[in-house]
Image (cartoon, rainbow, N blue to C red):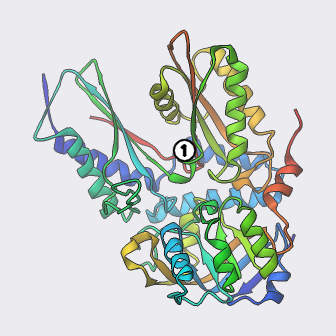
Amino acid sequence: MSEKKIVTPLTDDVVKTLRVGDTVYISGTIYTARDAAHKRLVDLLNEGKELPIDVKGQIIYYVGPAPAPPGKPIGSAGPTTSYRMNPYAPYLIEQGLKGMIGKGEMGEGVVEAMKKHCAVYFAATGGAAALLAKCVKHAEIVAYEDLGAEAIRRLEVENLPVIVAQDCYGGNIYKEGVEKYRVAS
Amino acid sequence: MRELDVGEITQAVKRLSMEANYFLGDDQVNALKEALKKEESPVGKSVLNQIVENQEIARTEKMAICQDTGFTVVFIDLGQEVHLIGGDLTEAVNEGVRQGYTEGYLRKSIVKDPLRRVNTGDNTPAVVHLRLVPGDKVSITVAPKGGGSENMSEVRMLKPADGPEGVKNFVIDRVRRSGGNPCPPIIVGVGIGGTFEIAALIAKKALLRELGQFNPDPYYAEMEKELLREINKLGIGPMGLGGRVTALGVFIEYHPCHIASLPIAVNIQCHAARHKSVVI
């Protein structure tokens, strides 16, 4: 476990250095998308159409931020639960997506796609939404404005703190970490 | 008969919606600081530090503690000596939510229809639990409930023969299956008895209790302590990343029930355990 700073877009070489339990500070451009936006993106892929954003080398943050108060680029912006994106994430990883940020464990199909295409899943602290919003320097809606909080936004972030929760080698902190601290009774 | 304009209820709900989302209770902040002393996992400690720092930022900058500012659950105890004037009570509550969530820059998370999923745009309707009580006061509690932890909740109809062991196993298993999804360290609301719907309602109501308080009945107080010990042995830890602190508290409420039944409900609350009250 170590501390690392990474800048987007990500390459396979960078993803391969990231191991379960590492604390990572992300800077650069990331995109937001959650349930409804994912459904639309995957519907487009199934129809053979082009996506409104190029996901190659990118990171998607599963977040539906609160409205931006005056003078701030974004409102509170913590992660949403990731398992709801299980049906969609493998399609985007196949398109070259290199990372996801959320909370809670991601499922089998996603793990296989992460191993095959070299991608990584980061956990951010759920509920630490005011703290995480401070790392967002700029935010703009780039697709699906009608979805409100669920619209796709392009964010510029500086040192967004996350933990490597599931890595490209099949490592999984939700299994390893829990096993380590479980007390038999 | 005391007359009360429902406009006062609108104002109260508006203010409480904002305050609940910005200011975490002292009992919870203290419990999180205590948890930091107990946590052994370095990742778990770093998560707890972020949670403590986050609520401080939210408090000073008046920002939502969590972006999921919840379904606005409102408990109203209405004194039967109060005559409400000036409009409809439910609409007055919804107007409070509408104003609070708009002026407070809180996220609107409610869709009109569970399948067609179009956002109502103002976080209404609220969920209102109205109870008629003696007296001439109105007490209002606003408790925004996030989707992540609500999704990990469950009601089950046990057999009377399952007894206390069946109840305890169900609660622990429900927490185990939830893992990191409900944003641990969690608070576990448990409703035992009543009917299908009463069990769920008292499990939710249990979450309003202050951390550190136990059920006044020693039998259930003991069960709360035992469940908390067992849950913290699961190893789930802060945000499910492994650790000693999975729950900050277990609150049990019970209710008389049918000879054939043993309903049990677990309502899980994330660490952003938001609720604020007022008596008018």
Amino acid type for the residue under numbered disc 1? Asp
Q: Position of residue B141 (x, y in %)?
A: 38, 38
Report the number of numbered marks. Answer: 1
In the displayed image of the protein, which residue is found farthest to the left?
A: B86
- Residue at 31% x, 53% y is B124
Q: Can residue A166 be seen at all in this image of the molecule?
A: yes
Q: Quadrant of residue A15?
A: bottom right
Q: In the rendered view, tell whether residue A145 sits above or below residue A9.
A: above
In this image, A99 relative to A167: left or right? left
In this image, B265 relative to A68: left or right? right
Q: Quadrant of the C terminus of chain B?
A: top left
Q: In the rendered view, tell whether residue B215 sits above or below residue B275.
A: above
In the displayed image of the protein, which residue is found farthest to the top?
A: B259
Q: Quadrant of the N terminus of chain B?
A: top left
In this image, A54 relative to B180: left or right? left
Q: Nearer the viewer, residue B27 or B84?
A: B84
The secondary structure type at the circle numbered 1 is: helix
Crowdedness of circle 1 by 10 Å Cα count: few (<14), some, many (20+)? few
Q: In the rendered view, tell whether residue A3 sits above or below residue B273.
A: below
The residue at which mark 1 appears reads as B26
Q: Quadrant of residue B220?
A: top right
- Residue at 64% x, 79% y is A92
Q: Can residue A69 be seen at all in this image of the molecule?
A: no
Q: Position of residue A73 (x, y in %)?
A: 45, 80
Q: Position of residue B189 (x, y in %)?
A: 57, 34
Q: In the rendered view, tell whether residue B7 sits above or below residue B190.
A: below
Q: Position of residue A22 (x, y in %)?
A: 81, 71
Q: Chain of mark 1?
A: B
